[in-house]
Structure formats: structure tokens, C-alpha cells
């Protein structure tokens, strides 16, 4: 569909959605290439699955309002950095960091910020590794790296936090979610240890 000038003016992305979609596809292709490289090196597929999206108009406007920003293309593309998002779900903790290291070396992909929510989890238990990157075209995107356990917890927490009728149990639910997150993190660490033992990489 071709947008007229009025529709383009109202678009939170200033008519650049096709460019954002193309960037999303390019990043996924980049991730797949790194995945193939790691698979050839270790004879093991480090990635369980890859998800990607360009944030919807409604979601981006809501995020602007939540952060007290004007609903403009500048806010959506320059201040908020996750208009384009790619999530890479890995099997083991070591794969997350190996993938991070490879992403840092990709030509034309500038890593402008990193947040390690695995070693420094959020208070609610959320864990993931976030990279904010800038492409050669100047598009800013977010790449999230996490394990299967982290991804499962985040998906369930996302659904539960939008439940309206908690009947006064909100504090208990938050505490239970945090406990579950910590238990899953311990499981990730144990599974990594077992993998290292199998591969003969444990030192001690």
C-alpha cells in the first residue's frame, strides 16, 4: 500500500518502516551466518530459535508515552533503540557469550551499548544479554541473547504482569516469579557444567 503524505506524517516511523523491515531481515541473515560458523566450528548448533520484529505503531507510541517522550520519528528511532528487535535463544550460557563475541566482530555493525542482565539480573529476576547496534544505514536495533530457560521465564512473566485481577496477591506473585527465575538460572549453570564435563573442558 502506498501511503499518502498525510498518512506518512502521522506514522511514528516517518514512513521508514520498509527500511526497518529490511534491516530486520539483514540482521536475521547475519545471525544465521554466525550460527552456521559456530556450527561448523563445534559440530553443534548453538541456537534453538531466532525471533525478530519491527515494533508495531501502537507499541511504539505506548513506549513513548510511558517514557514521557513525544510521539515522533526522532523518539522512535533515535531515543528508543528497539524499533527493530532480534532475539537469539541459545542452548547454553557459553553460547550466549560466544555469540556476543562474534557479533562484536561483524563488519559494518557497530555495537553502541551492552547490558548484561545475566550476570546482573533485574530485580524481578529477568535475565538476558542486550546489545544495541547501529547498522551501516544508521538504523539502531536491539539484539537480545538468552538461554531457553530465560526465554521461557520472560514469556510467562510478560503474560502474567498484564493480568488485572490479582486479588491482592501481587507481592506474592512477584516473589514467586523471582524465585523461579533464580532456580532457572541455577539450572542453566548446572547444565553448563555438565556440558563442559562432557566436552572435557572443565578444569580443576
Image (cartoon, rainbow, N blue to C red):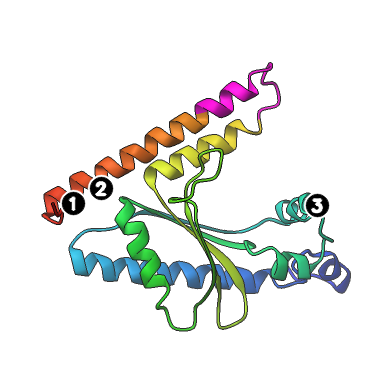
Which residues fall within the magenta stretch? 163-176
Q: Is 190 situated left or right of 113 in this image?
A: left
Q: Which residue is mark 1?
A: 196
> Upstream in the sequence, badge 3 or badge 1?
3
Q: Describe the element under mark 3 as helix, strand or loop.
A: helix
Dot 1 crowding, Cα within 10 Å, few <14, some 14–19, many 20+: some
> Upstream in the sequence, badge 2 or badge 3?
3
Specify whether residue 134 is painted magenta: no
Q: Residue at x 49, y 83 (%)?
A: 108
Tell which residue pokes out farthest to the right in this image: 6
Q: Residue at x 58, y 34 (%)?
A: 159
Quick one: 186 or 10, which is closer to the camera?
Answer: 186
User: Could you tell me how far apart the alpha carbons at marks 2 and 3 are, in whole angstroms?
Assistant: 41 Å
Query: Looking at the image, is 120 positioned above or below residue 19?
Result: above
Q: Which residue is mark 2?
A: 192
Q: Which residue is mark 3?
A: 65
Tell which residue pokes out farthest to the top in this image: 167
Q: Describe the element under mark 1 as helix, strand or loop.
A: helix
Q: Are marks 3 and 1 in contact (CB under 8 Å)?
A: no
Query: Looking at the image, is 74 positioned above or below residue 159?
Result: below
User: Could you tell me how far apart the alpha carbons at marks 3 and 1 are, in whole angstroms?
Assistant: 46 Å
Quick one: 94 or 9, which is closer to the camera?
Answer: 94
User: Could you tell me how far apart the alpha carbons at marks 1 and 2 are, in whole angstroms?
Assistant: 6 Å
Amino acid at each position: 500500500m502506498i501511503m499518502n503524505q498525510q498518512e506518512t506524517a502521522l506514522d511514528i516511523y516517518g514512513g521508514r518502516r520498509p527500511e526497518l523491515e529490511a534491516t530486520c531481515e539483514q540482521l536475521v541473515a547475519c545471525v544465521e551466518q554466525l550460527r552456521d560458523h559456530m556450527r561448523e566450528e563445534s559440530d553443534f548448533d548453538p541456537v534453538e530459535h531466532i525471533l525478530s520484529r519491527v515494533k508495531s505503531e501502537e507499541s511504539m507510541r505506548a513506549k513513548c508515552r510511558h517514557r514521557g517522550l513525544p510521539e515522533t520519528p526522532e523518539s522512535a528511532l533515535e531515543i528508543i533503540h528497539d524499533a527493530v528487535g532480534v532475539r537469539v535463544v541459545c542452548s547454553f550460557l557459553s553460547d550466549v557469550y560466544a555469540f556476543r563475541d562474534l557479533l562484536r566482530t561483524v563488519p559494518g555493525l557497530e555495537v553502541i551499548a551492552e547490558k548484561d542482565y545475566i550476570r546482573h539480573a533485574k530485580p524481578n529476576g529477568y535475565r538476558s544479554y542486550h546489545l544495541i547496534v547501529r547498522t551501516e544505514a544508521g538504523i539502531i536495533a536491539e539484539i537480545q541473547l538468552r538461554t531457553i530457560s530465560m526465554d521461557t521465564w520472560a514469556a510467562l512473566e510478560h503474560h502474567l504482569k498484564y493480568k488485572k485481577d490479582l486479588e491482592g496477591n501481587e507481592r506474592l506473585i512477584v516473589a514467586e516469579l523471582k524465585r523461579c527465575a533464580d532456580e532457572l538460572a541455577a539450572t542453566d549453570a548446572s547444565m553448563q557444567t555438565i556440558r563442559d564435563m562432557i566436552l572435557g573442558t572443565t578444569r580443576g
